[in-house]
Image (cartoon, helix red, strand yellow):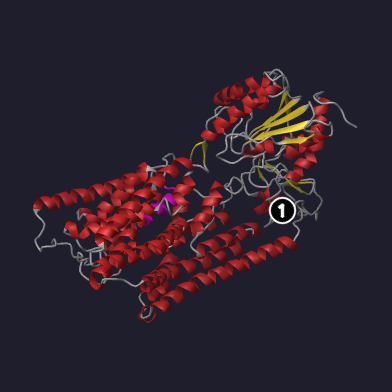
Amino acid sequence: MIPRYRLGFRPDIEGLRAVAVLAVLAFHATVPGLAGGFIGVDVFFVISGFLITGLLLRDVSVTGRFSLAEFYARRARRILPAAGVVLLATTAGAWLLLPPLRGGDIAGDVVTAALYIANWRFVAGQTDYLAAERDPSPLLHYWSLAVEEQFYLLWAPLLLVLVLLARRVGRSPVPAVTAAVVALTGASFALSLWWTGLSAPLAYLSSPSRAWQFGVGALAALLMPYLGRPDGGEDRPGTGGTGGTADRTGRRPRFAARVASGALGLAGGAAVAWSVAGIGPATPYPGTAALVPTLGTAAIIMFRSPLSRVLSLAPVRAIGRLSFSWYLWHWPVLVLAEAALGEQPWPVRLALVLASALPAALTLRLVENPLRLSEVVSALPRRGLALGTSAMAVPLAAALLLNGGVVHGAATTQVTVAAADPAGTADAPGTALRPTPAQARTDFPKSAGCEIALTATTSPPCLFGDTTSKDRVVLIGDSHAGQWFAAAERVAVRRGWALEVLTKPGCPLPRLTVVDPRLGREYRECDAWREYALKRLAAESPPRLILVASLNAYASDRTVLTRAWDATLTPLSRLGATVVYLRDTPLPGKDVPSCLSGGPVGDCAFPRRAGLRPDPLAEQIVAGERPGMRLLDVVPLLCPGTGDTCPAALDGIVLYRDDAHITDTLAVRLAPRLEQDLEDLDLIPTVL
């Protein structure tokens, strides 16, 4: 016997969509006190799992089966046209407002978003050290659509198989479906916990670690007939009453049951509200923290309470009807506006996301509702599927055109220094830049394999020059040490010495424990690698020279930073070699190649005050407070004079390959200068 899933329209679920989208909007607008607004996506996932599973169960309870073609056609009508319109608009906005190189990045985002695999592209980008610091994509929010579609690509066929098997043996499919949902939900939640501790971006953006939230919604749908509230909620008005006023036997729920239901529904609302206000950037997420908004949402859906009446109010429902289109539009509007205007304070960001309701309303009225409710399109599944295919194909074509224009421009256009260059560079007007902006992005040191992976705790030998020589130069630190590979190699090779490279990106050489944004957790592998590197050097023959460098932005407290440097420099000083500190290079804080691809060099200059951070270690060496240590400082070369800005290019050379690292072309150009400085300090023999 299959329970009767009498799915009527649920106005409170429509209102719950409003809560979800408003939470996301507040989070992206950086409204103070609402740092956990990103959990609005979790609310959407639970609602989706509940509604879709409920609709499929309704079809099974009425007909004994359901049509996959009809299911996917319905999904295509509901999701793809509006999503395709926003992809097209974002492609056009990128072409109009963004530098060519950034447009090329977004073309790739459009392709993966149109194919509903964007979450995996963003996982790769946020865990890739070379790409993690680029400006956010205006399509970053499409990760959640990709997760949802990937889930249903597997869930609907699995449910159909279970239904058919149950029919073959003459049993109700509900026990088998319930067991499958419980198993998959548990496995996904366990994976989510594991990945949260391993890599937060992977756990947050991937479909396997998010599937459990759809599973919670599906379990709610399976339980509804047994809770005296069989109205699962078809996401479309006019298909039935609100139901839920009687249990399966027709008796009205007893008073105690109504009180319990109200309390549980209100508790669910409190859980969601607490999540919006109480969860923040420091919370490992999803992890166990995601249980709070997920179970809270399920409770709101399953148990009638005074909150149900609030969510059913007409103004709240109006926002809920707009929620999908508004979610699609708000982020591209915000990102593209800030690309044109610069970073804005939260009141302006809030105004921008609120203003995005206008294109959202137009999309709802002109695209989403007409196609979703069209009798002509919905008459045959193949029409809905054809509509969805077209909604994917058109943005794909637009993205290919955008990327083709970027590639052609990068291949045929040389960026030159403007005649009136406000950066005060020494370049003559018309000087072509080297490398080109497109080439600068991949202008890395020629030390492949030495900058080890995020989770690695040991380094390969990484020896260069005459590896048999008893004399050795050591280059040690993070990627800001690795960027000086060309200079260190020149020193070693011209003297017949060996060069040993010990570098780990994002890992401070001073003994600081940091949280890595790519992992979303404490960077334990960094601490382990640092200890490994110091022990390895202590076990090897003493080097002739040790070059150290590190990003000068891991800590702002001078006392903490000084102590951290002491903990690292003390064992290095015991090795018997002179330790030379390469002062950190200026930090542009912007994607320099992208900027240079779209305008005059002078427009890409950055504020001196922000780019040149105080450097306590350099100050101590100059003051003679670090006996035995020497300083090499190229900052006056990269940011000459005393003006308010530092240039992005000098003497026709692009200085930075991203927002923080110098190009290898610049490192090669500066190598003779650093070699000469070391010779002048009598740290290395002079070579003619």
Taking depth in this image into account, of 493 and 353 the one nearest to the observer is: 493
Residue found 51% across the figure and 58% down from its top: 118
20 in magenta:
yes
Quarter of the figure with residue 79: bottom left
Q: In this view, does 633 lie to the left or right of 613?
A: right
Furthest residue toward front: 169
Q: In this view, does 190 lie above or below 179?
A: above
- State how many labels appear: 1
Asked whether residue 6 is in view, the answer is: yes
Q: Position of residue 516 (x, y in %)?
A: 52, 39
161 in magenta:
no
Residue topped by disc 1: 439
Furthest residue toward right: 688
Asked whether residue 35 is in view, the answer is: no
Q: Is residue 594 above or below residue 161?
A: above
| Element assignment for label 1 | helix
Magenta segment, which residues? 19-32
Q: Where is residue 635 in the image (x, y as percent from the top left)?
A: 72, 35
Main secondary structure found in the magenta portion: helix
Taking depth in this image into account, of 156 and 434 the one nearest to the observer is: 156
Q: Residues within 10 Å of mark 1 (few under 14, many from 20)?
A: some
Q: Is residue 534 above or below residue 494?
A: above
Report the amino acid beneath label 1: Gln
